């Protein structure tokens, strides 16, 4: 069965877009120009343009300039602007960048505006505190998110299989994946292998053991036995033919287009659930979400509601109140929230979320987030703990260790020892 035919939608990335008229419907005065930096596709940038245009009707004396960039180029560019003292007033931020810039005091303390200009009363409990860095809220999320696994349900149906139920087990995944591999001729495998990503399903599996990647001090929160078990689990998947060989997995790269699902090697992709709509745009097959597998004897489901696509206000802007007013518009006003829809995640205002219009893929994502929130969610992990200063180095060491074993360059024990030597050297507190 040939599953490599797919549709690709490409988007040119935005440069600077000037939008006349924008301000703050609830606070702020005067006039001027304010910049916003945002990463993502042309479609995403166009939604912000639309939101700016709608917001301009409230305060026509402000001009916004939009600086858009691709995901891979964005953070370096923004860091250069922050270092140079000329960053945009509003900054779309990857989740790992909120602690980074917050620790540099490059982001406004939003506690000053929460409860006044910024209404967060309808947000999920505890979500605002996820952006609290060293005691103050430095970022807010544009939407709620959670880990998940999206499946090509058309393929499953054609083979006589069903979408795994939420809460299915790791043993269930191994059995189903091996059965799928046997049912399809050629280079096709029952599950994606995302085991080399520290920030993806490993943390879900680890939470099921009652542990986490890092403890509250920033030190490693797991030991050699955990990583050994994790690598041996995925070796079992490969040995059973349930997961692709290393060469196919390595070709996946870091884009949705290059994923093993879209390239036609596997029926699923494990990642943040808000990626569903973007992945759906790349294939004619129907994709649908379910959970990452769960350990029935574990400490919890390992799934927690996390922020998706964060935003902060530059600490050196002259008009933080205007920036906060725009954020309130897109987070809490039915018009503003309706424009962004589920593009940035499940709208954090729970009262508005159920009243907005979504595409079929977005609705599946919204329903999935709501299901996890109500039925499966473990306590959320603050960004400061998710992404300590050592995260980039530990993340790279983790990926290298797993890939070295996957390709046969090292045994499990050798890969584990090298990882801990490297990781502990960057997480160890200075004497």
Image: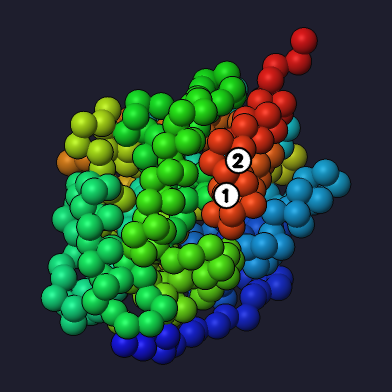
Residue in view at x 23 percent, y 67 percent: 179
| Crowd rating for badge 2 (residues with CA inside 10 Å; few <14, some 14–19, many 20+) | many
Is residue 90 visible in the rendered image? The answer is no
Image height of 261 relative to 314, above or below: below
Q: Position of residue 10 (x, y in %)?
A: 55, 83
Q: Position of residue 371 (x, y in %)?
A: 20, 49
| Crowd rating for badge 1 (residues with CA inside 10 Å; few <14, some 14–19, many 20+) | many
Quadrant in the picture for residue 356? bottom left
209 sits left or right of 326 in the view: left
Q: Nearer the viewer, residue 377 or 173?
A: 173
Image height of 17 relative to 122, above or below: below
User: Which circle marks residue 415 in the picture?
Assistant: 2
Quadrant of the image containing the C terminus = top right
Residue wearing tag 1: 405
Image height of 206 relative to 197, above or below: above
Quadrant in the picture for residue 104? top right
Is residue 408 visible in the rendered image? The answer is yes
302 sits left or right of 13 in the view: left
Quadrant in the picture for residue 135? top right
Q: Do the residues labelled 2 and 1 touch (CB within 8 Å)?
A: yes
Q: Kindly report the distance in space between the C-alpha atoms of the residues bearing marks 2 and 1.
A: 6 Å
How is the model colour-coded? Answer: rainbow
């Amino acid at each position: 069965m040939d599953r490599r035919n797919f549709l690709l939608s490409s988007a040119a990335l935005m440069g600077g877009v000037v939008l006349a008229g924008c301000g703050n419907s609830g606070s702020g005065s005067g006039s001027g120009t304010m910049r916003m930096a945002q990463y993502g596709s042309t479609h995403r940038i166009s939604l912000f343009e639309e939101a700016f245009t709608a917001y301009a009707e409230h305060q026509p004396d402000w001009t916004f300039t939009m600086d858009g960039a691709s995901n891979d180029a964005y953070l370096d560019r923004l860091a250069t602007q922050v270092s140079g003292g000329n960053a945009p007033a509003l900054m779309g931020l990857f989740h790992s960048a909120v602690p980074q810039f917050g620790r540099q005091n490059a982001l406004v303390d939003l506690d000053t505006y929460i409860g006044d200009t910024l209404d967060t009363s309808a947000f999920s409990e505890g979500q605002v505190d996820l952006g609290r860095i060293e005691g103050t809220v430095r970022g807010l999320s544009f939407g709620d998110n959670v880990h998940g696994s999206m499946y090509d349900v058309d393929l499953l149906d054609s083979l006589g299989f069903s979408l795994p139920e939420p809460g299915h087990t790791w043993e269930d995944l191994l059995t189903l994946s091996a059965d799928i591999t046997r049912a399809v001729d050629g280079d096709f495998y029952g599950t994606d292998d995302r085991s080399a990503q520290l920030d993806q399903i490993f943390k879900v599996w680890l939470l099921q053991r009652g542990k986490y990647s890092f403890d509250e001090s920033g030190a490693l929160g797991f030991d050699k036995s955990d990583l050994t078990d994790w690598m041996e689990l995925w070796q079992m998947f490969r040995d059973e033919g349930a997961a692709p060989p290393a060469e196919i997995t390595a070709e996946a790269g870091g884009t949705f287009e290059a994923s093993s699902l879209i390239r036609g090697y596997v029926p699923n992709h494990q990642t943040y659930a808000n990626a569903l709509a973007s992945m759906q745009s790349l294939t004619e097959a129907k994709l649908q979400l379910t959970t990452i597998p769960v350990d029935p004897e574990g400490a919890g489901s390992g799934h927690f509601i996390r922020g998706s696509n964060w935003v902060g206000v530059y600490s050196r802007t002259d008009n933080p109140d205007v920036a906060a007013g725009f954020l309130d518009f897109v987070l809490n006003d039915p018009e503003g929230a309706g424009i962004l829809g589920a593009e940035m995640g499940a709208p954090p205002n729970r009262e508005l979320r159920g009243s907005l219009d979504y595409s079929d893929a977005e609705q599946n994502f919204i329903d999935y987030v709501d299901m996890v929130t109500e039925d499966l969610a473990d306590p959320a992990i603050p960004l400061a703990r998710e992404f300590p200063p050592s995260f980039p180095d530990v993340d790279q060491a983790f990926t290298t260790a797993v890939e070295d074993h996957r390709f046969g360059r090292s045994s499990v024990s050798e890969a584990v020892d090298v990882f801990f030597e490297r990781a502990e050297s960057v997480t160890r507190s200075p004497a």
